Image: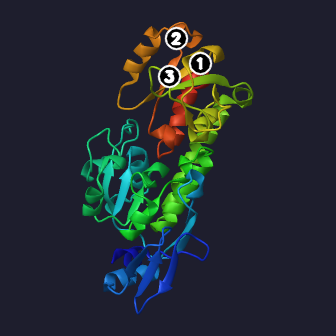
Amino acid sequence: MRVMKTIGLTALCGSMLLFSACGSGSKTVTGSKGDSYQVSDQEKSVSTDEANRKYEPYTITLNLERSGIGQNIKETFTSAPKRVLLDGDQMTDIFLDLGLQDHIAGYTRGACLSTVSEFPARDSLNKVLEDGSNLSSASKEQILDLKPDFMMGWDSLFSENHFSVDWCLQNHIIPYFPYCCSDSATMEDLYQDYDVLGHVFGVSDKAKERVEEMKKTIDQVHTSLGNEAYQKPVSVFVYDSGQDAPFTACQGIPGDMIKKAGGLSIFDDINKGWATPSWEEVVQRDPDVILVLDYNHDTEEKINFLKTNEATKNLRAVREGKIYSACCADMQGSAGSANAIKIMAKQFYPDKFH
């Protein structure tokens, strides 16, 4: 069975999973609800053994506590996962950026499509659901039919409402939700995701190379803007979606990206990555600029709404035409995040770039 053969998952004492020997080549996995799952590692091909000898085991901690869906788990990989499921373009782009398309068993594009980054390999991937849908819309049967051994998505994907951690492990699927998805995340957390995935999939050098390229892009932005832009940043209202009330970016990785572009979210005082304040609060905070998040080339539609909505049509940023856009997928932490910072900086400070 794939868990021990392909992934080699182990859990340490005190974590949610405990492994105990139950005969040659097999172990018993005990989940958080006391369920026991038999996991065998007897069947191994010569090629798998040879690959495993070159693979350096790597242990990660799956932070379940940050979302209240369990106790933290330590996972040790003794070989790279072979069949990966990815939830959304932003997560798929990371794998494509690392050259791991051959490991992808399936993916969803989600609602926020990657509209800037170009990865031709995406066209050859198995798209599990229609655009606009996430893995949370899939049935457990659909997931199991794909025979995944690794699944990457937001924390909520692994809640009891969808595919719980216990369910995943029972079915030999290792769940992974990125560090960059936490409410307190910064670009450093995205770099950590690259580092972790680089180790897990045996492409550490490629991961380091990509992180260095991202850092270089951001350093170039800082040099172009100068210190004053960071000392007196423009105030930014991020319009993601919503008509009765706006869904907007506050802190987390979108907030950090805006800061690195010389801006500051007008809702930076909310200790969340994303929130739904009121239009009245937007008016009170009177942003210098508005940043519309593009889901799937829907920026113009959102701009038209802001220009006609009673609550926003008289905002200073609307009157002055300072409404810009950024790719929503990249604003959640992805391969295109550093480039998105550069794009925002050029929009906020056009005179600084020539």
Which residue shows up at 35% across the image and 87% down it?
42
Are the residues at dot 2 and dot 1 in contact (C-beta closer than 8 Å)? yes
Give the class, few, some or many, for how many residues have Cα within 10 Å of label 3's Cα (few <14, many ≥20).
Answer: few
Q: Which label sits on residue 38?
A: none
Q: Which residue is mark 1?
A: 282
Nearer to us: label 1 or label 3: 3
Residue 115: x, y in percent? Answer: 37, 35
Give the answer, above or below, for where 178 lies relative to 240: below
> What is the secondary structure assignment of the residue under circle 3?
loop
> What is the secondary structure assignment of the residue under circle 1?
helix
> What is the secondary structure assignment of the residue under circle 2?
loop
Sequence-first disc among 2 and 1: 1
Give the class, few, some or many, for how many residues have Cα within 10 Å of label 2's Cα (few <14, many ≥20).
Answer: some
Which residue shows up at 40% across the image and 64% down it?
168
Give the answer, above or below, for where 71 lies relative to 133: below
Q: Which label sits on residue 311?
A: 2
Which residue shows up at 36% across the image and 48% down it?
136
Which residue shows up at 55% across the image and 67% down it?
73
Q: Which residue is mark 3?
A: 245
Please, what is the three-letter code of the amino acid marked with disc 1? Val
